[in-house]
Each structure stands twice: as structure tokens, then as C-alpha cells.
Amino acid sequence: MNFLGCEGAWLVQADGSTICQGTLNTYTVQEMRDFLTPALTIAQKAEITGALLTLFVAVWVGKKMRTTIPH
């Protein structure tokens, strides 16, 4: 799937059709993804991975403590 972009202004004509007043460009899905959400750096990926592992361990330890403590 490709997306259309207009370097200029989108205009609506009297008959309801849309035209680009400027340069019309096409973008692939990957180009749109990179444009809208820039790629993470290695440091950002490591930070997110560390945070997820910490959360997983905290939940696992909390569950273990809850099931092993007698009531």
C-alpha cells in the first residue's frame, strides 16, 4: 500500500475532487512508519528491555511470595 503526500496544499475543486497544488509524492508503508515513529536507538531498546525484564521479575517474585506465605 502506498500513501500520497503533497508538498504544497490540498485543494477541493468545485466538483468535489481533491488536487495537490504543489509536488505530489508517494510513500511506502515503511517510509510512513519511519516518518511518523522514528526508529529507536540501541540505548533506547536496551532501556525498554531492561524495564520490561524488571517488571516481569517483580511480578514473578510478588506472585511467588503471595503463594508461599501461609495464611
Image (tube, grey):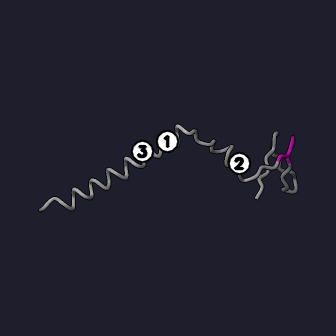
Q: Which mark is residue 51?
A: 3
Instruction: Indicate the amino acid at tag 3.
Output: Ala
N-term-proximal mark, 1 vs 2: 2
Mark 3 touching mark 1, by CB under 8 A? no
Rendering coords of residue 7 (x, y %)? 81, 40
Q: Is residue 70 left or right of residue 23?
A: left
Q: Is residue 68 left or right of residue 2?
A: left
Q: Which mark is residue 46?
A: 1
Give the magenta-colored segment's residue range.
20-25
On whether residue 35 falls in the magenta region, the answer is no
- Name the residue located 42 percent from the left edge and 49 percent from the top edge: 52
Rendering coords of residue 43 (x, y %)? 52, 37
Against 22, is 55 above or below? below
On whether residue 22 falls in the magenta region, the answer is yes
Report the Cα–Cα distance between label 3 and label 1. Answer: 9 Å
Q: Which quarter of the figure is the N terminus placed in?
A: bottom right
N-term-proximal mark, 2 vs 3: 2
Report the Cα–Cα distance between label 1 and label 2. Answer: 25 Å
Q: Which residue is mark 2?
A: 32
Q: Quadrant of residue 6?
A: top right
The nearer-to-camera label among 3 and 1 is 1
